[in-house]
Image (cartoon, helix red, strand yellow):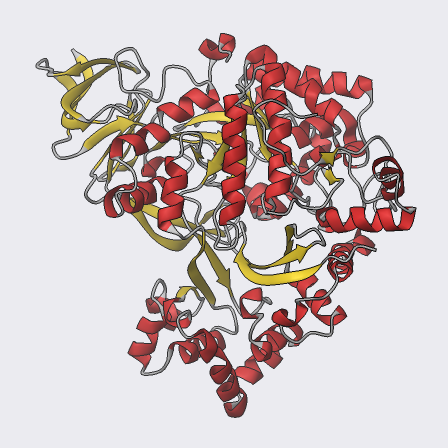
């Protein structure tokens, strides 16, 4: 939802409890095949891979998304 | 009779108003009179041709450990800094249970480069709560400290190891709120959190496992006190920084608190990105949010030795290959081999302007101590060789433990940085004092502000620069009765020579407990530094007994908005 | 699959006083995003793209960057496993 006085910026979400790439893909990009949606999401969110991927649970866990991560749900805006 | 009178100075009072000639009288810890003061005083300072300003406030430091063995936060005090904000980036040393001490030591070692031996030999662990830590540092404090409490340590206190594994339960969030409330009541100036930092295992620090619900709950406690939230966003990406500052803005508006994020810096490739961030900051301020970006004054230097691979050489395949894949013996052999050396020198010619300006900053042999601080051009001239060959030879002579500095490689466009520092919503800070101690000096940024941006470039007036690092900072952080020279205010005062003030050359000194070293800079042109009415440092006499305070202090409890 | 590719590679001074490589990814809509790589990730990226020089990374797919970042980060994992 647009806020008065704020220009449009790149759309992002914060993950919900237990979110995985697939969960976010299904929720945020429902019109795309899941593999394609996950690939798009990952390409828009390379910062998530810029750290040891222990993520939630314990070292070695398969889910690299942290609860505090900003997850972009669209590509960078063209200038 | 006054306790102290500073006579004949140019008073730059921190408000931004034009300088004026006056005397400043102090009684006890307060400024009592400014003007022509005829009465005698127990102590007098002649400030003819000098400026008299409020003491500087450094809003982004990591002196938490150093304060345990050095209540002056050397050399910050000698640079005219009378108040430091510690505990940034989610890390403080309290509250801290005994069982978590080594965890925090590891984090301070990883993130701030504080050696383990410094903790072993410099720290008596006699606190757990925030209140006990404040009591501990207050004993020897000569500089004022406005301590943030770190989100990561609050998480550890309440959740133990789970702090590094998962989101908090409702009960745990309530527990963290209670702990934060105790810390604020004990004197914390606010809360710090980080979305970037990694711990000693190179895993995300505990604060990064918090969800939005937890941040909101903690911010609501900050709102009860009107205290500050500091964050480290993903500063390398403007979209991420904007997303974080939008979150901060909502938090600021909802809980009526000031927020600040750092660092923001300008590199050649991110000028447009910084402009976008600042546009968003302006938009959020227009909505009433307080989201202060911190910008450092000093340029960013790159340091390297040939003992560790550096991307500075990434465009020189022969150099990079030997650094990346060679053992120290391989590198030494490659440097010593006549043909290889010739090849390396030819390849380096592509970056001809860089090499002469590199500085030899550290080596261990006695014979090469005379070159420390000199450029490779200067060293090469003395040796009758070329700068690149001088770099190779020094590395060989020092068994690769020769350290070089490429200065001003980032945040170095003075016109652009000057414009940014002048921006009304930019908070000058991000010095990182007390951190990165084995990589570069984090002291003297205020001297650089006055010498480079005020005196040399005339990018700012002296009055504006002083305001930015005194009354503006005090206002942002809710620190009452400091940051201005006016009767009734606490006498935190810096006297300096505007014609000579600057940061000194970087030097490597052995003054860290446990026989440790760090990079520091001396001050130049600072004459006298006064903390709470007592002379804390003079150019002639060095450090004196003074009594720093923990801020914002009890008067600030009702400060809000 | 996303068609985003590396469009620019620049040496940058990092906050920590080290040299880093800033790789810009360009998306099909023309939008661009920077990704900061440390020395270890750069080495893996160069190897995976069979590149000798960073300029040879231009035009390569974003997946190489993701995999390099992940591999670089995961080098700490073995020592961290409980």
Q: Residue furthest left?
A: B38
Q: Looking at the picture, tell me which residue is in the foreground, B213 or B363.
A: B213
Return the x and y of residue B102 as percentages of the image width and height: 68, 40
Q: Residue B285: percent from the left, percent from the top? A: 51, 24
Check the image and report above or below for B312 versus B329: above
Residue B221 lies, with reference to residue B493, above or below; the image says above
Residue placed farthest to the bottom in the image? B339
Q: Residue furthest top?
A: B558
The residue that appears at 40% across and 49% down in the rendered structure is B520
- Residue placed most toward the observer, C72 or C31: C31
Quadrant holding the N terminus of chain B: top left
Q: Position of residue B98 (x, y in %)?
A: 69, 30
In the image, B79: left or right of B155?
Answer: left
Instruction: State which quadrant residue B496 falls in.
Output: top left
Relative to B308, B539 lies left or right: left
Report the residue at 30% width, 22% height from top.
B15
Location of residue B371 (image quadrant):
bottom left
Question: In this rendering, does residue B85 appear at all?
Answer: yes
| Residue B528 appears in the rendering | no
Q: Nearer the viewer, residue B97 or C52?
A: C52
Q: Is residue B369 left or right of residue B48?
A: right
* Relative image position of residue B198 (x, y in whole percent): 68, 44
**What residue sits 36% from the left and 64% below the top?**
B372
């Amino acid at each position: 939802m647009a806020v008065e006085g704020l220009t449009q910026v790149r759309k992002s979400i914060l993950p919900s409890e237990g979110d995985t790439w697939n969960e976010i893909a299904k929720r945020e990009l429902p019109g795309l095949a899941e593999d394609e949606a996950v690939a798009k999401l990952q390409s828009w969110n390379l910062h998530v891979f810029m750290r040891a991927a222990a993520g939630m649970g314990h070292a070695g866990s398969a889910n690299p998304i942290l609860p505090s991560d900003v997850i972009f749900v669209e590509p960078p805006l063209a200038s | 009779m006054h306790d102290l009178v500073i006579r004949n100075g140019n008073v730059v009072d921190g408000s931004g108003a034009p300088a004026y000639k006056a005397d400043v009288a102090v009684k006890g810890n307060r400024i009592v009179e400014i003007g022509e003061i005829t009465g005698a005083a127990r102590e007098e300072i002649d400030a003819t041709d000098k400026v008299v300003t409020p003491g500087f406030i450094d809003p982004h430091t990591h002196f938490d450990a150093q304060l345990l063995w050095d209540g002056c936060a050397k050399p910050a005090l000698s640079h005219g800094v009378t108040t430091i904000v510690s505990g940034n980036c989610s890390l403080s040393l309290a509250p801290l249970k005994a069982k978590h001490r080594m965890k925090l030591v590891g984090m301070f070692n990883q993130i701030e480069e504080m050696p383990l031996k410094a903790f072993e030999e410099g720290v008596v662990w006699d606190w757990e709560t925030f209140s006990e830590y404040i009591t501990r540092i207050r004993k020897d404090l000569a500089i004022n400290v406005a301590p943030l409490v770190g989100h990561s340590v609050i998480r550890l206190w309440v959740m133990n190891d789970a702090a590094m594994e998962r989101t908090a339960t409702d009960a745990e969030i309530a527990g963290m709120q209670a702990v934060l409330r105790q810390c604020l009541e004990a004197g914390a100036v606010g809360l710090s959190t980080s979305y970037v930092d990694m711990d000693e295992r190179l895993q995300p620090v505990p604060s990064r496992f918090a969800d939005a619900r937890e941040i909101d709950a903690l911010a609501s406690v900050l709102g009860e006190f009107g205290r500050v939230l500091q964050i480290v966003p993903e500063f390398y990406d403007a979209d991420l920084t904007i997303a974080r500052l939008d979150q901060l803005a909502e938090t600021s508006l909802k809980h009526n608190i000031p927020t600040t994020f750092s660092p923001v810096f300008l590199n050649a490739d991110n000028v447009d990105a910084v402009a976008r961030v600042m546009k968003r900051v302006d938009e959020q301020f227009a909505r009433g949010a307080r989201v202060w970006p911190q910008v450092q004054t000093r340029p960013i230097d790159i340091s390297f030795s040939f003992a560790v691979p550096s991307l500075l050489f990434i465009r020189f395949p022969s150099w990079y290959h030997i650094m990346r894949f060679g053992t120290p013996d391989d590198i030494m052999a490659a440097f010593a081999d006549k043909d290889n050396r010739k090849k390396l020198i030819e390849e380096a010619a592509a970056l001809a302007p860089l090499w002469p300006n590199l500085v030899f900053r550290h080596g261990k042999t006695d014979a090469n101590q005379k070159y420390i601080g000199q450029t490779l051009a200067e060293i090469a001239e003395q040796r009758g060789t070329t700068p690149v060959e001088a770099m190779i030879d020094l590395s060989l002579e020092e068994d690769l433990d020769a350290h070089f500095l490429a200065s001003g490689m980032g945040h170095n466009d003075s016109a652009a940085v000057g414009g940014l520092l002048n921006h009304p919503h930019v908070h000058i800070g991000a010095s990182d004092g007390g951190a990165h101690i084995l990589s570069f000096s984090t002291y003297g940024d205020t001297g650089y502000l006055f010498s480079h941006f005020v005196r040399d470039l005339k990018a700012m007036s002296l009055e504006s620069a002083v305001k930015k690092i005194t009354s503006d900072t005090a206002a942002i952080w809710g620190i009452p009765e400091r940051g201005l020279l006016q009767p009734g205010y606490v006498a935190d005062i810096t006297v300096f020579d505007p014609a000579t003030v600057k940061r000194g050359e970087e030097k490597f000194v052995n003054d860290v407990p446990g026989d440790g070293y760090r990079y520091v800079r001396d001050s130049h042109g600072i004459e006298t530094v006064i903390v709470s009415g007592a002379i804390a440092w003079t150019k002639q006499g060095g450090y004196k007994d003074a009594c720093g305070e923990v801020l914002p202090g009890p008067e600030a409890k009702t400060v809000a908005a | 699959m996303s068609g985003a590719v590396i469009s620019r590679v620049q040496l940058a001074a990092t906050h920590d006083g080290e040299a880093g490589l800033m790789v810009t990814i360009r998306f099909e809509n023309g939008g661009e995003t920077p990704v900061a790589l440390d020395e270890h990730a750069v080495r893996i990226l160069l190897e995976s793209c069979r590149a000798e020089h960073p300029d040879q990374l231009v035009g390569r797919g974003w997946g190489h960057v993701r995999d390099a970042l992940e591999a670089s980060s995961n080098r700490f994992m073995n020592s961290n496993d409980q």
